[in-house]
Amino acid sequence: MREGSLDAPIRHPVPWRDTDYHDGVALEAKMRRVFDICHGCRRCFNLCDAFPRLFDLIDSSETGELDSVSSADFEPVMEACTLCDMCFMTKCPYVPPHEFDLDFPHLVLRHRAVRAGQGKIGLARRQLSQTDRNGRLGCSAAPLANWATRRGNRLTRPLMEMAVGVHRDAALPEYRRKPLTALTAPPEANERAPAYGRKAVIYATCFANYNDPDLGTQALSVLARNGVETHVSHPACCGMPQLEMGEIARVAATAAKVAAEFKDWIEDGYDVVSLVPSCSLMLKFEWPLLIPGDESVHRLASATFDVAEYIVDIAGKEGLADGLEPLGGDVALHIPCHARAQNMGRKAAEMLALIPDTGVTVIERCSGHGGAWGVMAGNFPTALKVGRPVARQTVRARPAFVVSECPLAREHIIQGMEGTDDGAPSLGRVRHPIGLMARAYGL
């Protein structure tokens, strides 16, 4: 037996339809096998808070080994996982094809699926995961919704903390009056651009559709400048919020629906460009593992690009349109975990390197946000702690712009910077690297 593996990690389809998958006794046996291996390795101690919790639990037990730890004490360990996939992608030497066959994030997913089947997901968490419904409601009452969710609102935020468990100090995204899908038609493609003839349909994602349509219009403008015919579509949320809670059947149903709606676009020669890396990850990697027999899901996975990945693909194959100008200041670029988990390289960094005379400090470490996980009352202090090194590194860079491919992570970093000795400086409002490309093009 080899100690660790030098082979590329592979993932098995998730057998969530099997009866044994939801069996609590079988799950406990699997958890104990995995935890014992993790305890003997500890290479992942500096990732999320799940592993320190596990190791502290074992170290403080009667024997200092897993055999004296009660299974009832495992819950905080599983709760701390944000499904970022970094242990699987970058740290664990025992992932498949190694015979130990460890996939810690998908073990957590199984644990949460069992809990979901037992009805242990609270009503408030289920309601928070209804991102499309919440987005439509938020947009329809944007001024009121933004007032109610604003940090520092001493009337509503304590009530939100009590009612739905969202920490009163956690920054929440604002809603816009009009979603991206309701805005005007995309700009005309530049016929003089080297990539003229490409076609792409933008998967708006919940965040760009309801919270930041500017992200979508910036992407559309940059693509059109580079000759790409574009359209926007948002059939439904990618299901990441439901996946985080273990509601796999809901995610699988969403995957089948969205893939079916994108099928005609793909058959007509369109690429699919996603604006948020968590959503790209779902389309590319998670959905095919949940419904491996669905041909439309696999075709969608093959046709999907993250937006920075797509711009870099154009630059490498046809070349970008002329007109990029310096930004007038340097950039701190955060590479979020779900961009790294796509195993495509640092595409946002490659994209920003195309802008002349612009220094880019790349920060490739967890921001601590973890999607909905990081704003919950029990997790928010830990989220700030995990993201503190990123905040400090960003402050040291003294950038004019702070951007992340995950706009939620970006806002969490800004909030972390406020807690440093130097505080958060005055920064450009652009959140996403594609916004800097639009700015460099004068768009």
Image (cartoon, rainbow, N blue to C red):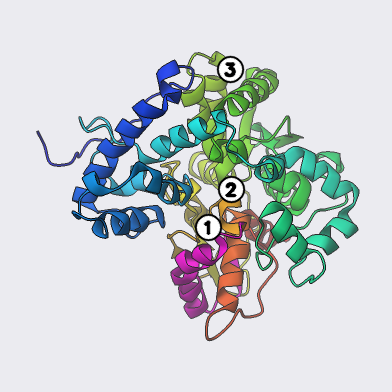
Residue receiving disc 2: 320
Pick the residue in front: 222 or 24. Answer: 24
Q: Earlier in the sequence, mark 3 or mark 2?
A: 3
Taking the view exactly as shown, the residue that stands out farthest to the bottom is: 421
Residue 299 pos. (x, y %): 54, 20
Query: Looking at the image, is 182 positioned above or below residue 236?
Result: below
Res. 354 mark? 1
Judged from the image, the secondary structure of the residue bearing numbered disc 1 is loop
Tell me which secondary structure the magenta stretch mostly adopts.
helix
Q: Earlier in the sequence, mark 2 or mark 1?
A: 2
The quadrant in which the N terminus is found is top left
Secondary structure of the residue carrying numbered label 3: helix
Whether residue 188 is in magenta: the answer is no
Residue 423 or 7: which is nearer the viewer?
423
Q: Is residue 67 above or below residue 30?
A: below
Label 3: few (<14), some (14–19) or many (≥20) C-alpha neighbours in 10 Å: many
Tell whether label 2 touches label 3 (CB within 8 Å).
no
| Side of 209 relative to 273 (left or right) | right
* Residues at marks 2 and 1 touching, judged by CB atoms closer than 8 Å: yes
Q: Quadrant of residue 104?
A: top left
Q: Of the residues shown, which amino acid type is indicated by label 1?
A: Leu
Question: Which secondary structure lies at badge 2?
Answer: loop
Instruction: Give the Cα distance between marks 2 and 1.
Output: 9 Å
Q: Is residue 206 above or below residue 114?
A: below
Where does residue 392 sit, x and y in percent of width and height? 47, 76
Left/right placement of residue 372 relative to residue 111 reads right
Mark 2 residue crowding within 10 angstroms, few (<14) / some (14–19) / many (20+): many
Does 402 lie within the magenta span? yes
Which region is colored magenta?
Answer: 376-403
Report the amino acid beneath label 2. Answer: Leu
- The numbered dot on residue 296 is 3
